[in-house]
Amino acid sequence: MEKALEFPALLRLIDERSVAFRAVVAAAPSLEVRVPTCPEWTLLDLVQHLGGVHRKWAATVAAGPADAPPAGTSSEHASAAPREREALLAWSAESTEQLLSALRESGPDRGCWTWWGGSQSPQTSGAVARHQVQEAAVHTYDAQTALGSAQPLPDEAALDGVDEFLSTCCAGPYTWPYEPCAVDYHAAEGRTWRLSLSADGVRATTLPATAAGEDPDGADACLRGTASELVLALYGRLPVDSLKLDGDRRHFDLLIAWDPDA
């Protein structure tokens, strides 16, 4: 079984993806370029959003264990962002550093409020760091798409990202309102994750590696692609139909439309 990324690696990836994000924005012909993967948003909106997210989670991590997030939403933080490019990029870099500083100060195991309280992911600063890797990686892809230069997510972030998404956004004591099923996500890099869904809850597991050409038993459907493609499909950046799908695709249709908190 593969281990989750260590805390220093998560901090490094947040920094690396945020730097890559700003490099794309710096190269854009205008901040008014539309972002096709984030309908209604421009690059300006995207920079303001990611910076606001970084500042909100910096304050949340710094506050420590809590039953509610600290005052100030990511949108409120973003509203203070400058609109001139050079100043905006400096504000974005400061936002990232606020997040990284709060995470370094807290360490991986300190508790804090998170919106995924009922999920399989813990309510810790380490889990926040893990999710923020994906936030920065996917929004870097969004910015690249706006410039017609989309690149796959780095392998390290993508391989952790499939497990992080399933554990944080899907798995937990939620009632699956349809027939019980198990769906697999198989990465071309040799990793497979299973989501088991029933009325008793939803559970994400990493399956043992199988020999080349062999499939794990027991799945009703399987989505196949690179780890980057799987993460981008999970976040709605790529259509499921662009990946290889085995079994009954209806399970994935129901899963995409399902809201665990509804």
Image (tube, rainbow, N blue to C red):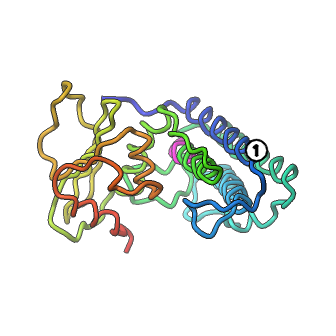
Which part of the image, by quadrant, shows the C terminus? bottom left
- Residue 145 located left or right of residue 94: left
Q: Quadrant of residue 211?
A: top left
Q: Position of residue 29 (x, y in %)?
A: 77, 52
Of the pair 245 and 53, the residue shown nearer to us: 245
Per the rendered image, the range of residues in magenta is 126-132
- Residue 215 located left or right of residue 261: left
- Residue 261 located left or right of residue 102: left
Q: Position of residue 100 (x, y in %)?
A: 68, 40
Counting labels gives: 1
Please, which residue is most extreme toward the bottom here?
262
Answer whether residue 65 is visible to the viewer in this image.
yes
Please, which residue is most extreme toward the top here?
211
Tag 1: residue type? Answer: Ala
Q: Position of residue 68 (x, y in %)?
A: 58, 65
Of the pair 145 and 132, the residue shown nearer to us: 145
- Residue 85 located left or right of residue 21: right
Which residue, given by chain and number where applicable, does mark 1 sit on? Answer: 27
